[in-house]
Amino acid sequence: MSESLEHHLQHPVFAAIAKAAKQLDQPVYVVGGFVRDLLLQRPCKDIDIVTVGDGLILAEQAARLLKPSLTVSTFKNFGTAHFNYEEYDVEFVGARKESYSRDSRNPVVEAGTLEDDQNRRDFTINALAISLNESNFGELIDPFDGLADLNQKLIRTPLEPADTFSDDPLRMMRAIRFSSQLNFRIDEITYAGIEESAQRIKIVSAERITDELNKIILSPVPSIGFKLLFNTRILHIIFPELVKLHGVEFRDGKGHKDNFYHTLKVLDNVAEVSNDLWLRWAALLHDIAKPATKAFDEVEGWTFHGHEFLGMKMVKPIFRRMRLPLDQKLKYVQKLVQLHLRPIALTKEIVTDSAVRRLIFDAGDDLEDLLTLCRCDITSRNQEKVERFKRNLGEVEKKVRDVEERDRIRNFQPVVDGQEIMDLFGLSPSREVGLLKNALKDAVLDGIIRNNREEAINFVVEKGRELGLQPVN
Ligand code: ATP
Ligand code: MG
C-alpha cells in the first residue's frame, strides 16, 4: 500500500468534486498529467477528472457546490465538460474504453471502468489515478507500476508498444517530448517500438505534431528531444530540412562542422537564457540554408555564402507546412535568421559608427534577441576560441550601447517625411521622392548630418537641386 496523497488534495476544488460524486453516487478519480506532475513536484494547473458515469452531470454539480455562478462549458461530442476555478483548469470525462480497428483511424469509444480508462493511456506514468471517493480518498491507483517508473525516470507504454503506437502514432512524439521535458529515459522495448513505427507519424495532422515539437523546443534541454527524433528517424519525416544539416564532408583533408549538432548546441544555449519559443525557433533555423549554399573553395575552404538570406526565405514555407503563425512571429524569426551574422561580422572589421547605426536600425526592437542569438551561436570545441569570440562580441555590444545612447536610432524615423519632401518641391508621389527619402535616411545613419529639422531640410534641398528640382518658395 502506498501512502495516502490526501494532503496534496486540500484545495476546495477536490472536496467539491468528491462531494458532488458522492451525491450522484459516481466513483471519481484524478488522473493523468496532474497526478504525474504532483508526484514529480512540478506545479500543474490542469486537473483531469474521470468518473464512472456521466462526466457532464458531475461537472455541473461540482461547479454548483463551488460557486453557483461558475460557468461550465460542455463538449457533448467528446463527452467532456470543463470549468475554471481559481488557478485551476478542471476537465471532466466519463471513464471510457477505446478499441481501434485496423482500417479506421478513429477509435470506437464506449463507456467503461476506471481500469479501461487507464488502459487506453499512453505511458505508465500517465496512467496513474488518485481516488476522490470517501472510502479511500487520496489513494493512488497504479495498475502498471507507474510510480516505480517515475522514480526510475522511465517512459514506458503500459501495453505492447506496437499496438500503442499504431493506435495513435502521435504517442511516439509524446514519448520523446516527455523524455526531453522531464529528462527521462525511454524504455528499450518502447524505444524499439518507436523505431519500428516511425513511418506511421505520417498519418498524424500537422497541428498535433507541431504542438509536440513546440513542447520539445520549450523543454530545458531541447537537444535531448531532437536527437531522439533524429535517431528514431521521425525527424526525417516531419522535418527533413534539419536532417540535411547532419553530417560532415571532407575535401583536401578539410571538413566543416556538423551543422545539425551545431544547431542543437545553439538551441540548448538559447534555452539556457530564454524561454521565448520564437527566439528558440530562430536558433533552430538560423543555419537552415547551409546545405543548400555549401561550396568548396580552394582558398577559403568550405563556404556557405548567403545562407542567412536563403535561410530567411526558407522560414515561411516551413512555418506554413507546420501550421505555425504567419504573422509577426514569422517576421521576427525571418529577421533573426537574416541578420544572425551581422553582429559577428562587425567584430571582423574596424567598427564604424555608421555600421553600428545600420545594425541598430535593421534589428529595431529585436536587437537584444539578435545579440543573444549571436552569443549562443559561438560554439567550438576550442574553449580559447570561444572566449576570444565572446570578448569580441562583447566589444560590439558595448559599441552598440554607446551609439544607441547617443543617437537613439532604434525606432528611427527621419524628422522630415515624404509628404514634406513633396510639399517642399511641389512634387506628386514619384521616384524622386523615394530617392530623396532614402538619401536622407542614409545621411543620418551614416552620420553625415544630425537628425534635426534644420539639417534635414537643408540636406533635402541640396540633394533636390542635384536632381534638378527647385524648392517652390
Ligand atoms: P501536458 O499537459 O504537459 O501536455 P499531459 O500528460 O497532461 O501533458 P494532456 O494532453 O494534457 O497531456 O493529456 C492528459 C492525459 O491524457 C495524459 O496524461 C494521458 O494520460 C492522456 N493522453 C493524452 N494524450 C494521449 C494520447 N495521445 N494517447 C493516450 N493517452 C493520452
Ligand atoms: Mg495536461
Image (cartoon, helix red, strand yellow):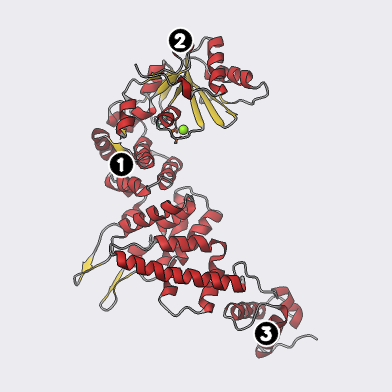
Reading the image, the residue beneath label 2 is 135
- Position of the C terminus, as image quadrant, is bottom right
Q: In the image, is residue 125 above or below residue 255? A: above
Up-down: is 254 above or below 178?
below
**Residue ID at (45%, 48%):** 322
Residue appearing at x 55%, y 54% in the figure: 327
3D distance between C-alphas at marks 1 and 2? 47 Å
Is 352 positioned to the left or the right of 465 in the image?
Answer: left
- What kind of element bears circle 2? helix
Quadrant in the picture for residue 297: bottom left
Labelled pair 3, 1 in contact (Cβ < 8 Å): no
Instruction: Point out the frontmost of discs 2 and 3.
Output: 2
Q: Amino acid at mark 1?
A: Gln
State the residue position of label 3: 459
Q: Secondary structure at mark 3?
A: helix
| Residue 313 seen anywhere in this rendered image of the structure | no
Classify residue 69 by image quadrant.
Answer: top right
Mark 2: amino acid: Ser
Q: Earlier in the sequence, mark 1 or mark 2?
A: 2
Disc 1 target residue: 199
- Cα separation between marks 3 and 1: 64 Å
- Answer with mark 3 or mark 1, whichever residue precedes in sequence: 1
Q: Earlier in the sequence, mark 2 or mark 3?
A: 2
